[in-house]
Amino acid sequence: MKLADNKAQKSLLRRKMLGQRQRLTSDQVKIWSQQVSQCMLKDPLFQQARTIMGYASFRNEVDLSPLLGRSLMQGKQLLLPVTDWEKQQILPVAVERYPADLRPGRYGILEPARDQKLWPLEAIDLVLVPGVAFDFQGYRLGYGRGFYDRFLTQLPRHTKIVGVAFNFQLVPTVFPEKHDVPLPVIITERGMINRLGSRRI
């Protein structure tokens, strides 16, 4: 497939999936999000991690608030991304109180204050990554700016990465490009899915 065709397919899929997500009711988002958090809490990837980078949900993304709050209660170090729009990158910043430490950033996305501690990448055990869609090969479709794509390639090999989505966001293909790197695990309200579609509850 030509690059232009590939980008057009990705754009169409992005619009379709965002439309579906926006049509979810608040009750659906709440219930499914709680199920995602419960699945993650039971998984060794979470239980063994000491430092976890999550995200603040936006526009009906999976809301990880129960998981993030529990992380702090269990004495784990919680990180959330701050977006540097000038440098086109996201930065992992420490959060001591969730959600009290968060402030609205650009587009109203909640993020830590910029004067909070910036965390070294090599000290992150687990990163939870939102997406517009994922396929069964582990490839992720984001919002099209490449912030997470660039961030994930900088992480050390020991850092575990989990894509986070609702089950309807799993599709046959997200039309990956050569530079795209697949994620090893995706979690939905139905459980953990290893790359190539093997599901573990």
Image (tube, grey):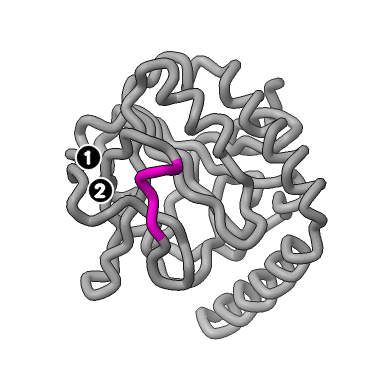
Q: Is residue 117 above or below residue 35?
A: below
Residue drawn at 27 percent across, 39 percent down: 94
Q: Nearer the viewer, mark 2 or mark 1?
A: 1
Tell me if residue 150 comes above or below residue 30 in the rendering.
below
The numbered mark at residue 26 is none
| Number of other residues with Cα within 10 Å of mark 1, as a class: few under 14, some 14 to 19, many 20 or more | some
In the image: residue 195, left or right of residue 35: left
- Quadrant where the C terminus sits is top right
Give the residue number, with chain letter if any, for mark 1: 121
Name which residue lies at 68% across and 67% down. Answer: 18
Q: Give the residue number, with chain letter if any, for mark 2.
A: 154
Main SS of residues in magenta = loop
**Residue nearest the viewer, comparing 94 with 184:** 94
Side (left or right) of 1 relative to 157: right
- What residue do we see at 39% from left, 50% from top? 102
Q: Are the residues flagged by discs 2 and 1 in contact, CB closer than 8 Å?
A: yes
Q: Nearer the viewer, residue 1 or 117?
A: 117
Q: Residue furthest front?
A: 100
Q: Where does the image place residue 197, in percent across and percent down from the top left?
A: 68, 36
- Whole-number angstrom distance, CA of label 2 to CA of label 1: 8 Å
Q: Residue furthest bottom?
A: 4
Quarter that holds the N terminus: bottom right
Q: In terms of depth relative to the viewer, which is nearer, 1 or 56?
A: 56
**Image: 184 above or below 151:** above
Q: Where residue 107 appears, x then y in whole percent?
A: 47, 72
Q: How far across and down, in percent of the image, does residue 145 sit? A: 42, 71
Looking at the rendered structure, the kind of residue marked 1 is Leu
**Magenta-span inclusion, residue 101:** yes
- Between residues 103 and 164, which one lies in front from this camera angle? 103
Residue 65 counted in the magenta span: no
Residue 39 location in percent, x, y?
A: 65, 24
In the image, the segment drawn in magenta is 99-103
